[in-house]
Every structure is written in structure tokens, then in C-alpha cells.
Image (cartoon, rainbow, N blue to C red):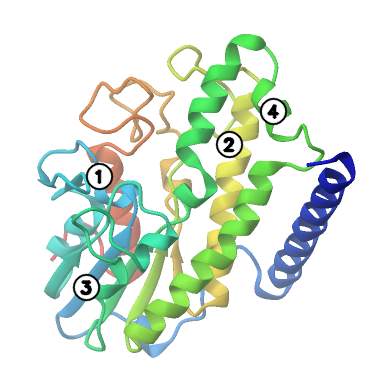
Amino acid sequence: MNHHTRQGGDLARRRRTMALGAALSSCALVAGVGASAPASAGERHSPRPVDYVALGDSYTSGPLIPRQVDANCARSDHNYPSLVAARYEVASFADVSCSGARTDEMWKAQGANGPQLDALNRGTDLVTLQIGGNDMGFGPIISTCAALSSEDLSGDPCRRHYTSSGVDRLTLNILETAPKVARVLRAVHERAPHARVVVVGYPALLPDDGSGCYPSVPFAAKDFPYLRDMGKRLNRTLRLVAWLNRAEFVDTYGPSVGHDMCKAPADRWVEPLRPSAPAAPAHPNAKGMEAMASAVLERLGKRAGHR
């Protein structure tokens, strides 16, 4: 690739970033990023048991949390969908969430797990969806930032890496994830036209105050606030995409502040890169799943722990 071709590609990529950002910003002014979808008859607590389907990635499936019931997808029977199903009036429950899932896996098999959208039908009443983290690149981002930290422990080598082209690639990843999640939501509505659809956000992985905890979480000091901001930006984007696509949004970030992977084992809901509780690195543990289930149940209009 010659110099002029690279320049043209960078310019096109920057223009696409600006266009996507402007579109989301304009929609945010109209919709209100902090707002949830308007209440409707479908949002009221159902007087009858519902047919519930859970879609999502590893933050839904719960890898390594006992009891694992699907080795292919590292799925736990104590993940938040299972806890919601146990405490809500459910006639049927299908959890097809799978570790490593991207938006593409809604339409295609992932090992022994079929296309997640195939679990839906016209009789589905409730759908929860947690997706986008792998499209954004959660795993590679964590490994890249951990590897770069030794270059400048007091600085921000990770941020410099992702902005070296003049465009923040993580922000671009989030902007490019938005239409993918929107496409999933359109497909959910097509296959389950009467369902109440709830998009579940991601919990706080890092301290909300921007502080760090090297070496427990091996990022450079100034990269902690940078990566925290990316997590918040992803959640804001998911909230907006939900609003624009006739879905509700459940905030799991707010309730999890103070329970990130830098906290002591007794207090954290997300495990660090060397977990002390049964959970995958940088993923919710059993307490985190309980907290997410409580947030979903609150949105559904039912207090956790009451049947």
C-alpha cells in the first residue's frame, strides 16, 4: 500500500468516524442519552407467566461460575438470566448466551450453540440481550493495555497506542458496534414481534474515580481513566441504540460502581486478571450476576428475591 493510498484510507476512516459520531450525538439530543424507552403496555408486569429467551456473550453466560451447564459456551446455571427466570413468572426459559459471542453469532452457530436468534419465535414474551463487548474488542484491549503498561507505568501508553493514527480507535470501535447491535434488535423484533426486549449494559470493570490498582490489574496509571471512559461510552451507546430500536435498557454500570475488579475480594463483583473467586478474568463473579439479575428484575417491575 503506497503513501497516498494509506492517506486516503485514513481520511475516509476519519470522515466515517465523524459522521457516525455526529449521527449519534444528534440522536442523543433528541432522545436523551439518560432516558429509557417510553413506557408502554408491553412494559407493565405481565399477569401471566412469560416465555423468556436470553441472548448474549460471556457477561451473560457466566464462564467458570458454578454450576457450569454448557461447556461449549461456558454457561452457568447461576448467571443473571437463570436468576431472573427463577424469580420471575416464567412459563418457559431458553438461555442461549455463549462466551465469545459477537453480534454475528446471532445469525450463525458458535460451536455446538446454534444461531442465538433461532431461539426466538412469535410466542416469545421477554428477551434480554447483552452484546457488543466482543465487537468492541474487550479481550484484545485488555491484553494489549496490560502488555504496554511496562513501557510507562505512570503514563498512558495504551491510550497513546489507540490514538496514534489521529483517531481514537476504541471510540471508532464503539461507533461501529452501534449499527451492529441495532441490526440485532431489528431481527429480534422481526422474530418475536410481541416480545418485551431489554438490552442489558455492562458493569463497571475499573474504579469509577479513575484510580488504578497495579499490579492486580496491570494497566498504567493514566490508562485507568481512559479505559473507564470507554466502558461508559459503550454503555451510553447501547442505551441510545436500545432507545432508537424500541427496546429498554438496564444500567448495570451504576449499581456496580465500588465493586470493580480493583476492590477487595469481599467487595468486588468483577474478578481481576487473576481471579480469586470462580469466574473468568475481567468478568462478573456470582455476586456480580446477582447484582445484574437484581437490576433486570427491577426494570421488569419485580423486586429481586420475591416471587
Residue 233 vs 258, above or below: the answer is: below
Looking at the image, tell me whether mark 3 or mark 2 is earlier in sequence order: 3
Crowding near the residue tagged with mark 4, few <14, some 14–19, many ≥20 C-alpha atoms within 10 Å: some
Q: Which residue is mark 2?
A: 228
Residue 247: where, in percent of width, then height? 46, 75
Residue reaching furthest to the front: 1
Helix, strand or loop status at disc 2 = helix
Q: How many marks?
A: 4
Looking at the image, tell me whether mark 2 or mark 4 is earlier in sequence order: 4
How far apart are the two marked residues, 3 and 1, measured between alpha carbons? 18 Å
Residue 97: where, in percent of width, then height? 27, 57
Looking at the image, tell me whether mark 1 or mark 2 is earlier in sequence order: 1
How far apart are the two marked residues, 2 and 4, measured between alpha carbons? 16 Å
Crowding near the residue tagged with mark 1, few <14, some 14–19, many ≥20 C-alpha atoms within 10 Å: many
Q: Amino acid at mark 3?
A: Tyr
**Residue 149 can be seen in this image:** yes
Q: Which mark is residue 52?
A: 3
Q: Which residue is mark 4?
A: 161
Q: Nearer the viewer, residue 207 or 223?
A: 223
Q: Quadrant of the N terminus?
A: top right
How far apart are the two marked residues, 3 and 2, measured between alpha carbons? 32 Å
- For image coordinates 43% across by 45% down, the residue present is 203
